[in-house]
Every structure is written in C-alpha cells, then in structure tokens.
Image (cartoon, rainbow, N blue to C red):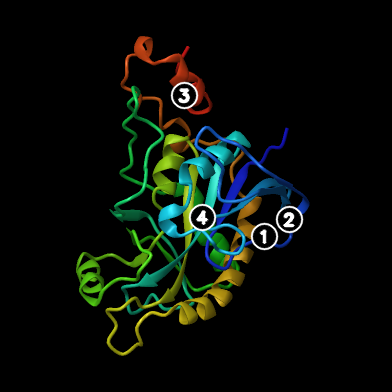
Amino acid sequence: MHTAKIGIIGGTGLYDIEGMTGVETINVETPFGAPSDSIGVGTLGGTGIAFLPRHGIGHHISPTEVPSLANIYALKSLGVEFIISVNSCGSFKEDVKPGHLLIPDQIIDRTQKRTNTFFGDGIVAHIQFADPFCPVLSRILFEAAQEAGATVHKGGTFIAMEGPAFSTRAESRLYRSWGADVVGMTVLPEARLAREAEICYASIACVTDYDSWHETNETVTVEAILTTMRSNIDFARNTIKLAAGRVPDTRECACASALGMALVTDRSIISDEQKQRLGLLIGKYIK
C-alpha cells in the first residue's frame, strides 16, 4: 500500500520534484475517474510525498478540464493530509512583482464551469470555508519561502477565474478595485474539495505578470509567463523541500475535522451507493 503525508499539485512549469527518493509511479482509480496523470510517490526530507502534475505531463489539460475531484480523492486515498499547490498568477499590486511569490489567505471565485463539491445526489454537506487556506500550512510555506531566498508576500486575495483566456483590461481593473492581490485559473475547486476531504491546503502563488491593468507593461503573453515562471519554479521547489519536513505530526487545525458538523443529511436516508462512493471521506461519520 502506497502512502504519503504531503501531496504536491504542480502547476505550469512544475512537472517533477527534485530531491524525491525512492519514487514509484502509480496509477490511481477513483469513483470520479482518473486523476490528471500518474502520481509519483516517494520521500522528501524524510516525509512521504505524492506528486501530481495538475495539467498532466506535457501540459495537455486546460484549467477548466482539470479533473479536480479525481485529483483530490486520489491524494486522499494515498493518506495525504497536506496539499501544497503551486499556482501561476498575475498581480494587481505594484509591489507584488513578477518573480515574487505570494502565500494567499483568501479567494474570490469567478469560475463558472467546474464541479466544486463531492456532495449532492442525496447527500448534503456545508463546510466552513471562511478561511479557504490552511493557516498552519500557509505559515510553514511562508517561512520556508523566506529561507529559500524568495521575495514572498504573506496573505492576499486570489481571484480564481475560469480562463483559458486571460482577463480583459476592464476585468483586471475591476478585480484590482476589489482589493484583490493576484489572479489565476487554479486553486478552485481544489481548495474547496480539499476542505471537504479534510486535507490541509495551501498555495505557493508564483507571480508571472501584472495581468492587463498595468499601463506601462505589455499585455500578458504565454511566452512572458513561461520565462518568469522558470525562475519562480526554482524558488517553489526549494520552498517545498524546506517545508516538507516541517508539517506537524498531529493536526490541530479545523481542516482535519471539517466534515464533523457539515453533514446535514439524515444518515438513515443516505444510500448504500453513496456510502460506498464517499466512504473514504465520510466513513468515520457514517456508522
């Protein structure tokens, strides 16, 4: 049985984790289909790691098409308690510059086409999501990024947009007027699904551009993003290496029991099919 304590979801430019040892590549089947790609399970800093490339090797899965339910369920099935997500993003703040990292603490959801819950079809759960990123894991990542030599910003609001097109200038100015810090096409529904799965989730947001509000910079291009992302990825990799051995042995954050008061459906009417399908998530609450 393969197990890992930390799951790494790699974004644009991050398709492997250097320094992992004893890596074995496995394919995981879930009730929600196949995850984005095979999962590499090994050890980093003495801690079990499961690495999953969000867009698949070769980057062939668009943000809207990422099979997030399968990805989170697959990591949960491997025993993952913490997910470190690497996300590229554009900045709305002059001092949050391309090449910097940001560890967000809030999200505004502007996605439109993504399934964002494991529940439905006869079973209802209302998780607490006021603080969408785990504060414990976020603090670990911020401190590790500082030690890695990155210019890193603590906290900030991440606009999760649908994509795959970049923002219009009007949208970019609107988001900036809301006080948002960065914009990207991922983190949701991952963060919400991770909370439903009682997994701690935090993001290393890699700033690649100024989106399209910044009059003195050229409009966003894939080429410019990839160029900046290469330097960001080195900082992200080193941050992950430092953080891997620092996650707590025992979780005391609210993430670990997020479903405890969230399941509102009368247990007696939950179908056997749903109990089996969601057993990995709800088993400890459904007797």
Q: Residues within 10 Å of mark 3 (few under 14, many from 20)?
A: some
Circle 2: residue type: Met
> Vertically, is 246 above or below 157?
above
Rendered image: mark on residue 17:
1
If you read the primary sequence from the N terminus, does the residue marked by circle 4 or circle 2 appear first?
A: 2
| Tag 1–tag 4 contact (CB < 8 Å) | no
Circle 1 SS class: loop
Circle 3: residue type: Ile
Circle 3 SS class: helix
Q: Nearer the viewer, residue 258 or 76?
A: 76
> Vertically, is 132 above or below 268?
below
| Tag 2–tag 1 contact (CB < 8 Å) | yes
Q: Which residue is mark 4?
A: 85
Spatial distance from mark 3 to mark 2, Cα to Cα? 32 Å
Where in the figure is residue 282, as x and y percent of width and height? Answer: 46, 24
Q: Which residue is mark 3?
A: 282
110 on left or right of 50: left
| Tag 4–tag 2 contact (CB < 8 Å) | no
> Vertically, is 172 above or below 65?
below
Spatial distance from mark 4 to mark 3, Cα to Cα? 24 Å
Q: Which residue is mark 2?
A: 20
Quarter placement of the N terminus = top right
47 on left or right of 243: right
Where in the figure is residue 155, as x and y percent of width and height? Answer: 38, 60
